[in-house]
Amino acid sequence: MKPLFSIGIFLVVYEATARSGWFAAALVPTLPVVAKTLWAMLADGTMAGHALNTLFRVFSGLALAAGFGLVLGFLMARYRPVERFFLPLVSALMPIPSLAWAPVFILWFGLGNTATILIVFYAATFPMLVNTWTGARAVNPLWLRAAGAMGAGARAMFWQVVVPGASPFIITGLRLAFQRAWIAVVGAEMLAASAFGLGWVIFDAKEFLNADIMLASLAVIGAIGFVFERLVFGALERATVLRWGMVRAAKA
Amino acid sequence: MIQVEKVSLAYDTPHGRVLAVEHASFSAGASEFLCLVGPSGCGKTTLLNMIAGFFAPSSGEIRVGGKAVSGQGLDRGIVFQDFAQLFPWRTALGNVEFGLEMKGVPKAERETIALEQLRLVKLEKFAGAYPHHLSGGMQQRVAIARALAYNPGVLLMDEPFAALDALTREEMQRLLAEVWRATRKTVVYVTHNVAEAVYLADRVVVMTPHPGRIKAVVPIGLARPRDPLSVEFLEHQKQLIAHLTRQEEEA
């Protein structure tokens, strides 16, 4: 089934609700109104400016989380003392919602990019870390034996066997990390950002009852998330683990 | 080429000490095809893994090419039973190139050698295919090519065809006999299939379980290629089966 079909149905239901007259038009604007606002914000470049700010924060936080999660995940899988030291910390820190840290980070770093990126980093770190750690431990021992028999040293064993062998988990980790980061950034911008970003736009629009601006921004947030989820991570999977048969596509 | 001398392996389990292999001694000459045959639990795979260097015996010594085995080495290639032994992220060619890459052979030369090995197992047309697109038999052929590519003197094989259907298995045995004739490797081949051992081996080492001991070493003096339906072939099979069943009566 085409993905646009399900989105289309959703929009039709929304439009019918907006036109039903059950709710105030200012609170539930029709799609043409939202579209007009969206177009105006796109045309004058304000939406692009906010989106770029948000993307910068997401990818800064995600890059830090991916780097940190990969390194620590592999170290935990390889060295028992590292695992023993960090596992309780992970278990204790993982259940804390990243947004719960927002007031603390704002106190420490003030409003702005640092606090926002740290919140994103916190949200994205754990899926990356846990998946890398699990993936490295799930590498088929036969591959390690075969590689060892063919003269692979520690370096080759890691880069040529453990990393590709763990890649289905790592890619899933990255995907989850992006989702978490994208969710966290909007909340973080509402609390910790100042004057820029999609989350901030929504929060700011509340002051003036601008439901059309809120919905236009939400549409952009959804669209960007959709593009990355489907295109970027979908393509990454197709180019690697799906092509290698390490994960299978669902049956029709 | 290979000397196994009074090799024992014991390990502790929650139920006490288990002797997986006890005082096993045999040798394999250069270019000899040796089969280790026995029921499960007789220690044949354990013995093969020790020759491969995956772990050391509790006592005794194993020498390959005159040198005592300590750990894995490029003088031995190994093929496992499980199809999953191939690297799924590498093509058939990429898998065969792995050992050459580890040896530091330049890319162009690597590819030439790897293609040659794939031709030997009749898979040169599938060089660019990923393992999951190949059948079980084809994957095992890639595994054989991969173990031969870096030119070890010894090829160790752990029931490589046990998970294949009977028809494919026979085809693979014929192919392996050809590959062995062409490459003249010393082969140690573990199987529980008596007919397979008679078809492939110069000599068969018969093992008995609990503890894993060598019961007999039976030479197979049949001319090659062998006919599994000939009277002499069946005689040899009977002889091996007699060794294997007599031990059960003793136990």
Image (cartoon, grey):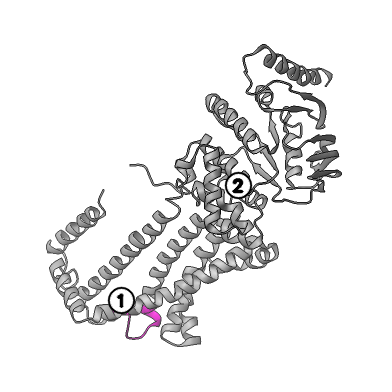
* Depicted B112 relative to depicted A69: above or below: above
Q: Residues within 10 Å of mark 2 (few under 14, many from 20)?
A: many
| Residue B18 or residue B29, whichever sits in front | B29
* Depicted B40 relative to depicted B17: above or below: above
Extreme residue toward the top, this view: B231
Looking at the rendered structure, the number of numbered marks drawn on it comes to 2
Badge 1 amino acid: Ala
Task: Judge whether residue A206 can be spotted in this image.
Answer: no
Cα–Cα gap, marks 2 and 1? 53 Å
* Depicted B194 relative to depicted A188: above or below: above
To which chain does the residue with label 1 belong?
A
Residue lying at 24% horizontally and 53% vertically, measured from the top left: A6
Residue lying at 42% horizontally and 69% vertically, measured from the top left: A181
Q: Where is residue A15 drawn, in percent x and y?
A: 16, 61
Residue lying at 66% horizontally and 43% vertically, measured from the top left: B78
Residue that badge 2 annotates: B149
To which chain does the residue with label 2 belong?
B
| Residue B109 or residue B189, whichever sits in front | B109
Q: Where is residue A213 drawn, in percent x and y?
A: 22, 76
Residue that badge 1 annotates: A51
Q: Main secondary structure of the magenta part?
A: helix
Q: Where is residue B224 drawn, in percent x and y?
A: 65, 23
Question: Residue B172 vs residue A12: left or right?
Answer: right
Task: Judge whether residue A56 can be spotted in this image.
Answer: yes
Tag of residue A5: none
Q: Are marks 2 and 1 in contact (CB under 8 Å)?
A: no
Badge 2 amino acid: Ala
Q: Quadrant of residue A32?
A: bottom left
Which is more foreground, mark 2 or mark 1? 2
Q: Secondary structure at mark 1?
A: helix
**Magenta stretch bounds:** A189-201
Q: Where is residue B120 drawn, in percent x and y?
A: 55, 39
